[in-house]
């Protein structure tokens, strides 16, 4: 865990819309921490620290550490509200995690070796950008890599073709074969057969 994902937080007792507005004017971000059958705790964090941290893709998927009154609490981001047009974080929801309890999270997909795939004459079409997974907090990956080097023109890779890290399982695959989502297709060149892409789109 890097210092970037360790954030100082203060407990707040002044609640309500007016209080939240005052906090934002003071460059603070209102937040709430809940989960693990404990009482929710209302917090504030420094806006500049949050903005810096959330620029990293891993901020949304990795276990973070909140330091509250000297106590370290491990958690994940469950929701973030942004200002509709200003570069401002309006509110954060954090969910406590326990090292021994599995968690559900959406992990981004990184596609690799696309250049090798497209040299075969087709074009790559991504069908998903993230995958819902279940794992222990310590096994939560920053991203899931999908290697398309061996994909053939007209072929579609599905969730069942993805190599998941040890201890990580797909929430969709756990529901059965009918939930084996299309992940990526190497479409045939324009004018050629595009049946695989159409099938993937139908899914």
Image (cartoon, rainbow, N blue to C red):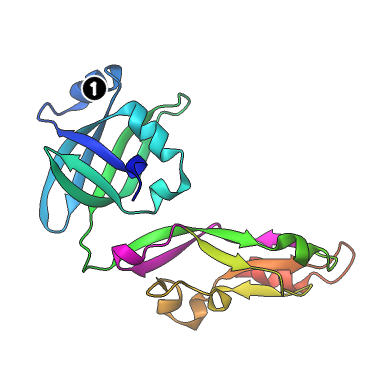
Nearer to me, 138 or 61: 138
- Relative horizontal placement of residue 109, taking residue 172 as reference (left or right): right
Q: Is residue 178 left or right of residue 156?
A: left
The residue segment tinted magenta is 123-142
Residue placed farthest to the right in the image?
191
Q: Judge whether 159 appears above or below 30 on screen.
A: below
Name the residue located 74 percent from the left edge and 67 percent from the top edge.
Answer: 186
- The x and y percentages for residue 130 are 50, 59
**Label 1 CA crowd tier, 10 Å (few <14, some 14–19, many 20+):** some
- The total of numbered circles placed on residues is 1
Residue 123 screen position, x and y as percent: 78, 61
* Residue 3 position in % (x across, y down): 33, 42
Q: Secondary structure at mark 1?
A: helix
Measured along the vertical axis of the image, is residue 25 above or below residue 181? above
Q: Is residue 110 above or below residue 58?
A: below
Residue 56 position within the rendered picture, expressed as x and y whole percent measured from the top left = 46, 43
Residue with the mark numbered 1: 23
């Amino acid at each position: 865990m890097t210092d970037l994902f360790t954030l100082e937080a203060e407990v707040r007792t002044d609640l309500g819309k007016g209080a939240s507005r005052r906090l934002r004017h003071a460059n603070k971000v209102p937040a709430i921490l809940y989960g693990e059958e404990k009482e929710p705790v209302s917090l504030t964090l420094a806006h500049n620290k949050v903005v810096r941290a959330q620029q990293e893709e891993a901020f949304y998927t990795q276990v973070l550490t909140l330091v509250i009154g000297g106590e370290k609490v491990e958690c994940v981001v469950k929701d973030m509200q942004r200002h509709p047009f200003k570069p401002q974080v309006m509110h954060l929801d954090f969910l406590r995690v326990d090292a021994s309890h599995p968690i559900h999270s959406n992990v981004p997909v990184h596609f690799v070796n696309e250049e090798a795939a497209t040299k075969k004459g087709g074009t790559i079409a991504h069908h998903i950008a993230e995958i819902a997974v279940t794992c222990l907090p310590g096994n939560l990956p920053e991203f899931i890599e999908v290697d398309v080097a061996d994909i053939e023109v007209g072929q579609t890779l599905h969730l069942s073709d993805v190599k998941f890290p040890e201890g990580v399982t797909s929430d969709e695959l756990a529901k059965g074969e009918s939930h084996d989502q299309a992940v990526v297709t190497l479409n045939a060149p324009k004018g050629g057969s595009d049946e695989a892409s159409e099938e993937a789109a139908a899914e």
